[in-house]
Image (cartoon, helix red, strand yellow):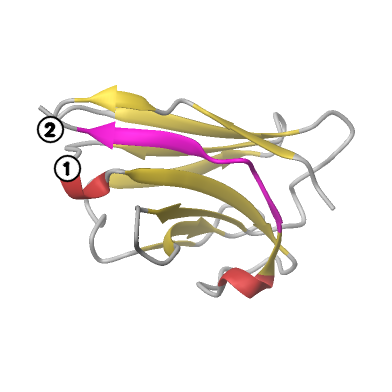
């Protein structure tokens, strides 16, 4: 099981941006795994936000974030990023990165076997 560590969350105002990072612990490599970002708001189920395939050639986004969020990865650094622009209050949630057991993207949480601890994103004026 991979050890993943997220960073970059925080409190921002509507319309502002944040960049989340997800790094693999030393000795772990991510380049055989599709990587996903999920989020969970209070009282709601965990939902997929975005996914990038193992080599970065394919990306998927939830309809609610299309055009505002961009997922990317740097396999040389074993790190995955989520650039979040034009943030809205409804983006407030704990964001988790996860490594899939597959090299291709899916939106099913059970396909992701390794999870980070989560980072809080709060969008409020």
Q: Position of residue 68 (x, y in %)?
A: 23, 46
Q: Which residue is mark 2?
A: 14
Q: Residue at x 62, y 41 (%)?
A: 117
Cα–Cα gap, marks 2 and 1:
6 Å
**Closest to the observer: 32 or 40?**
40
Q: Position of residue 61 (x, y in %)?
A: 36, 61
Residue 116 among magenta residues: yes
Image quadrant assignment for residue 12: top left
Q: Are marks 2 and 1 in contact (CB under 8 Å)?
A: yes
Q: Magenta-highlighted stretch: main secondary structure?
A: strand
The magenta span reads: 114-123
40 relative to 37 in the view: left or right = left
Q: Which residue is mark 1?
A: 89
Residue 48 higher or lower than 73, as above or below:
below
Q: Position of residue 86 (x, y in %)?
A: 17, 37
Image quadrant assignment for residue 104: bottom right
| Quadrant where the C terminus is found in the figure | top left
Q: Residue at x 33, y 28 (%)?
A: 18
Of all residues, the one furthest to the front in this rendering is: 43
**Closest to the observer: 84 or 67?**
84
36 relative to 99 in the view: left or right = left
Question: Which SS class for mark 2?
Answer: loop
Question: Which SS class for mark 1?
Answer: helix
Residue 122 higher or lower than 2, as above or below:
above
Q: Residue at x 58, y 69 (%)?
A: 109
Residue 84 among magenta residues: no
12 relative to 47 in the view: left or right = left
């Amino acid at each position: 099981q991979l050890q993943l560590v997220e960073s970059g969350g925080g409190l921002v105002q509507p319309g502002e941006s944040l960049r989340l990072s997800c790094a693999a612990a030393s000795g772990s490599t991510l380049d055989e795994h599709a990587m996903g970002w999920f989020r969970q708001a209070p009282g709601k189920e965990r939902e997929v936000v975005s996914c990038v395939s193992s080599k970065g050639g394919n990306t998927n986004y939830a309809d609610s974030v299309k055009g505002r969020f961009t997922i990317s990865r740097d396999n040389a650094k074993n790190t995955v990023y989520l650039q979040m622009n034009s943030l809205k209050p409804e983006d407030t949630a704990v964001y988790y990165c996860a490594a899939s057991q597959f090299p291709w993207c899916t939106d099913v949480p059970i396909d992701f076997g390794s999870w980070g601890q989560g980072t809080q994103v709060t969008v409020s004026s």
